[in-house]
Every structure is written in C-alpha cells, then in structure tokens.
Image (spheres, rainbow, N blue to C red):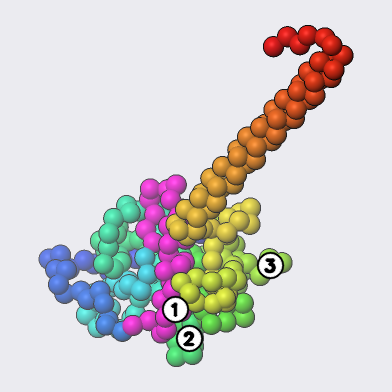
C-alpha cells in the first residue's frame, strides 16, 4: 500500500493570486512530433480507461504551481503527463496546488529526450519525490521506449523505489489499476514503432477512443457477417429440402401415383 504524504502548503497570499499573474504556456514546443503524439496517446487512452470514474483529472504539458516563490520565479516546467484522482474533472489551464486543496499529482510521466533526460531523471525526479511526494513517477523516451521505460513508487520513509517489470517489461501502477507498457504499431502515420501505452489488469490494451470505436465497428461487422452466414446456411438447407421434396415427387409420378400438393 502506498502512503501518500503531501508536504505542507505555503501560506496563501493575503489576497488571492489573480489568474493573470500565472503563466500557463512557456511558448516552447515539445521536443518532436513523436513526443507530441506520445503525450496525446497516453492522455487520451488514460481518459478512456478511467472513463468509468467521475473524479479524475488528466492533463499534459502544463505547469504545476505549488509555492509563492515558484510562481514568482517560474523556474520549474510542468510534467508532460499528470494524473490526479479524487478531484473534480473540470477544465484547468494548469495545476495550481493552493486552488486544489493542497493536492499534488498522483501519477507523473515525463517523455525523455537527449536534452531533458538527465534533468528528468535527476532534478525533476527529486522534485516529484521530495516536494510533490507524487506516488508514481514514470519516464520513457518515445524514440526508444523499450530501453528507456522506468518507473518509481514512493515509499513514505525511503522515497522513490524502482518498479520491477513483469515478464513483458510492463510496470504496474496500483493507483490507476493499470499497467504501463510498450505497444508496437502505427499511430497518426508514425511508425510502425513502439509507443508507451496503458494495459488493463487482464493484459488488454487500453484503447484510444477511435480504436474503441473501430473495435465496436469491427464487432458489429463480425456479427452482421455471422448473421448473414447463418441466413445463407438456412437458405441452403431450405433449398436442399426443396430439392429432396422435388425428387421425391418426381419419383412418385414415375410410379403412376398422384402427388398431393
């Protein structure tokens, strides 16, 4: 069981901080188009997988404001993907801790690149461990997901402890009730290549909305094909029965007997 211990929140401003004092976009694009796709895939599949819950917020590439000093200096960039459970699922430009009852993200994912890997595995990891006290932290390079996927679970006394992968190389997150693993395929005309995806406890891929829609369409087509096959088989049996009846009637006539219609 993960112990979730949140740090004390700094005193609020005497007057609530005007929204205009916070920036929610640093104007910098993601490292690459594949990073953008990987972030959107993870966010949208998580939203689909957790759609049965009404208390989940999932966002990406947004700032997390957690202190007055940090808000003034704007010295910490936001996570690529963050997930928070037990909160209202309203729209947010960023995650402002003092507006969220002191809540920090429960799960954070950073998409590595050559220019950010050391920071994501070092200073950012320390921040999420020591200040955010985020229970689960994952990192993955979209260009080398199999080799780079790693995760940590927060221990209340010992800090982040590495997650041990299963035989498929997947990492379990009990807060979400989902696996993090690598899926090989084509997304948005990128690939075929590996993508960081979510999997159900049973090992099924957590589908994107369009994948779920395509799956339903395929299932409907399969059912329609099966119905047509059954109808064709019924017609074939009826035709065969009629042919047998016609042959019997012809045989009876050959014998000079009358055939009743």
N-terminal label among 2 and 1: 1
Residue lying at 51% horizontally and 49% vertically, measured from the top left: 216
Q: Which residue in the protein does label 3 denote?
A: 168
Can I make out residue 96 in this image?
A: no
Q: Which residue in the protein does label 2 denote?
A: 113
The answer to whether residue 194 is magenta is: no
Report which quarter residue 7 is drawn in: bottom left
Q: Is residue 136 left or right of residue 101?
A: right
Q: Which residue in the protein does label 1 denote?
A: 35
Can I make out residue 82 in this image?
A: yes
x and y, in percent, of residue 219 in the image: 56, 47
In the image, 203 versus 68, the foreground residue is 203
Residue lying at 29% horizontally and 55% vertically, measured from the top left: 90
In the image, 45 versus 65, the foreground residue is 45
Q: Is residue 261 above or below residue 53?
A: above
Residue lying at 16% horizontally and 74% vertically, measured from the top left: 21
């Amino acid at each position: 069981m993960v112990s979730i211990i949140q740090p004390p929140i700094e005193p609020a401003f005497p007057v609530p901080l005007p929204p205009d004092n916070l920036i929610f976009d640093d104007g910098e694009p993601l490292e690459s188009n594949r990073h953008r796709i990987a972030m959107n895939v993870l966010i949208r599949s998580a939203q689909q997988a957790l759609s049965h819950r009404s208390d989940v917020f999932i966002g990406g590439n947004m700032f997390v404001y957690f202190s007055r000093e940090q808000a003034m200096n704007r010295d910490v960039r936001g996570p690529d993907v963050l997930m928070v459970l037990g909160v209202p699922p309203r729209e947010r430009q960023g995650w402002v801790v003092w507006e969220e009852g002191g809540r920090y993200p429960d799960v954070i994912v950073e998409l590595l690149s050559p220019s950010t890997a050391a920071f994501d595995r070092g200073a950012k990891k320390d921040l999420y461990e020591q200040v955010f006290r985020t229970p689960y932290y994952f990192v993955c390079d979209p260009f080398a997901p199999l080799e780079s996927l790693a995760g940590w679970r927060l221990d209340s006394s010992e800090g982040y402890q590495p997650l041990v992968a299963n035989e498929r190389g997947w990492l379990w997150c009990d807060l979400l009730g989902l696996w993090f693993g690598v899926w090989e395929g084509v997304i948005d005309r990128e690939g075929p290549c590996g993508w960081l995806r979510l999997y159900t406890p049973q090992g099924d891929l957590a589908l994107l909305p369009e994948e779920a829609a395509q799956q339903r369409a395929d299932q409907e087509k399969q059912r329609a094909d099966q119905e047509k096959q059954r109808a064709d088989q019924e017609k074939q049996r009826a035709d065969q029965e009629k042919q047998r009846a016609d042959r019997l009637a012809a045989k009876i006539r050959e014998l000079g007997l009358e055939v009743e219609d």
